[in-house]
Image (cartoon, coloured by chain):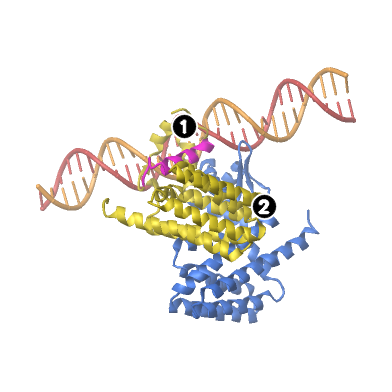
Chain colours: A blue, B yellow, C orange, D red
DNA sequence: GTCAATCATCTTGTATACAAAAGAAATGAG
DNA sequence: CTCATTTCTTTTGTATACAAGATGATTGAC
């Protein structure tokens, strides 16, 4: 692997964890990774500190850095918080959203719909993300937007899995349309509820997926 | 200053920033701080990475680490998010709270009340914190609890200032009692609204404080 | 005197060196 | 053969060294 700038190492490691190249419990070997990235241990250890704070890695003193993926319970909790954050974004956005943003939501939805018809999961995912990011942004609170984006990113690998559930994509679509309608009507509470349910159902689906997987592995 | 373990350096710096020893825009001199802490630059730089991710410090490549305190707008945004997070904690807690926890809230409130009568701001602050932390915990969602605690901590220096507002402490007290009542009655939405308003008013007070200060300094 | 370019100094970023701790392996007692 | 103790190896934590970029000063042109 070619040498990298230290700034990017944390990001690269994050990607490797998301890609499941490293799984829960794996120790991140400083010297091995240093060789792979073509750098010394120093910038790597700095990257570990960042990852530790973001919760992807646990730093055990004198033992090393270990990958920490959330277990089923923590994951459910994170989805619950995500649902609430989105609900808040929606409630604020209902009062503040611009016409252009509404059009962008409709456009994202149309492309989502097309993706559903072509069974194009990847494309669906991209447009789905645009839909949600637009709502975060239209909350008019950039701190909230950042926090929502951060958690959204963290849940990405898990959300992606559950999208493959049978019939999930069409259901998700109609939920999106309900959200747009509530936003267009300027109804804060309806928007909040629609978004909360939309995200919460993802958490529940995930829970179901987890419990079925648990019976096989470990 | 006596030598410190590297794990604590980030915390120590955080404290120095909260104490306003370092203010917005200050550059954190690696060599100077290394001397002060009695360590080399290496553990210091690792600490910088953590602080950077938590948002207290901005790392400018090839320039150094700079203290970044939130400006008025970002602060308002953070208070808005805090208000919403507390509202969510309250809504969940209303369904899940234990009798013991209700008693702890009542106890914290009683001690708050006593502190108000003695004009004991410090004591009020401690019991107020116990009150809020208990609600976070009773949300039954430890991820949410962590996030709320994190933001609460971050807003600490600013909240403390605004507690000195004339008449704020008694008002805050009665708001607390409304929250306890809603929780005891098991009413999620009432609890959420009571907490949201309780925290939001802090943000507004702060805004007022800021704008009056702005006219003097800078 | 002002501005620009060059040079010196200071800082950061990264590699390397070394000490201390943890873990693995080997030795020895029972 | 098993378990405990000791030795050896590996790995982390930190200091130091050095190179490259940034800052500031000095010199020179106009």
Identify the residue shown where x is 46% and y is 46%: B116
User: In the rendered structure, does residue B7 fall within the stretch colored magenta?
Assistant: yes
Q: Secondary structure at mark 1?
A: loop
Report how many numbered discs are placed on residues in the image: 2
Which chain does the residue under circle 2 lie in? B
Q: Secondary structure at mark 2?
A: helix
How far, Cα to Cα, is label 2 from label 1? 49 Å
User: In the rendered structure, does residue A128 fall within the stretch colored magenta?
Assistant: no
Q: Residues within 10 Å of mark 1 (few under 14, many from 20)?
A: some
The x and y percentages for residue B146 are 58, 51
Q: Quick check: D30 left or right of A75?
A: left
Check whether the beta carbons of the residues at disc 2 and disc 1 lie within 8 A of each other: no
Q: Quick check: D17 left or right of A31?
A: left
| Vertical order, B114 against A158 (above or below) | above
| Vertical order, B34 against A47 (above or below) | above
Q: Which residues are magenta?
A: B6-23
The x and y percentages for residue B167 are 40, 52
Q: Which of the 4 image quarters holds residue A29?
A: top right
The residue tagged 2 is B99
The residue tagged 1 is B39
């Amino acid at each position: 692997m070619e040498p990298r700038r230290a700034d990017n190492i944390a990001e690269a490691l994050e990607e490797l964890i998301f890609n499941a190249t490293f799984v829960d419990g794996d120790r991140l070997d400083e010297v091995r990774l240093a060789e792979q990235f073509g750098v010394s241990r120093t910038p790597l250890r700095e990257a570990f500190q960042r990852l530790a704070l973001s919760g992807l890695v646990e730093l055990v003193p004198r033992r090393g850095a270990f990958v920490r993926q959330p277990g089923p319970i923590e994951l459910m909790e994170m989805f619950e918080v995500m649902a609430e954050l989105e609900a808040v974004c929606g409630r604020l956005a209902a009062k503040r959203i611009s016409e252009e943003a509404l059009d962008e939501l409709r456009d994202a939805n149309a492309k989502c719909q097309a993706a559903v018809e072509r069974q194009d999961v990847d494309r669906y995912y991209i447009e789905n993300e645009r839909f949600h990011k637009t709502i975060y942004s239209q909350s008019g609170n950039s701190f909230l937007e950042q926090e929502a984006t951060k958690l959204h990113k963290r849940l990405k690998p898990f959300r992606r899995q559950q999208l493959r559930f049978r019939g999930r994509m069409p259901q998700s679509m109609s939920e999106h349309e309900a959200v747009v309608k509530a936003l267009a009507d300027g109804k804060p509470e309806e928007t909040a509820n629609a978004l909360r349910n939309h995200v919460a159902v993802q958490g529940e689906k995930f829970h179901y997926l987890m419990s079925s997987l648990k019976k096989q592995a470990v």
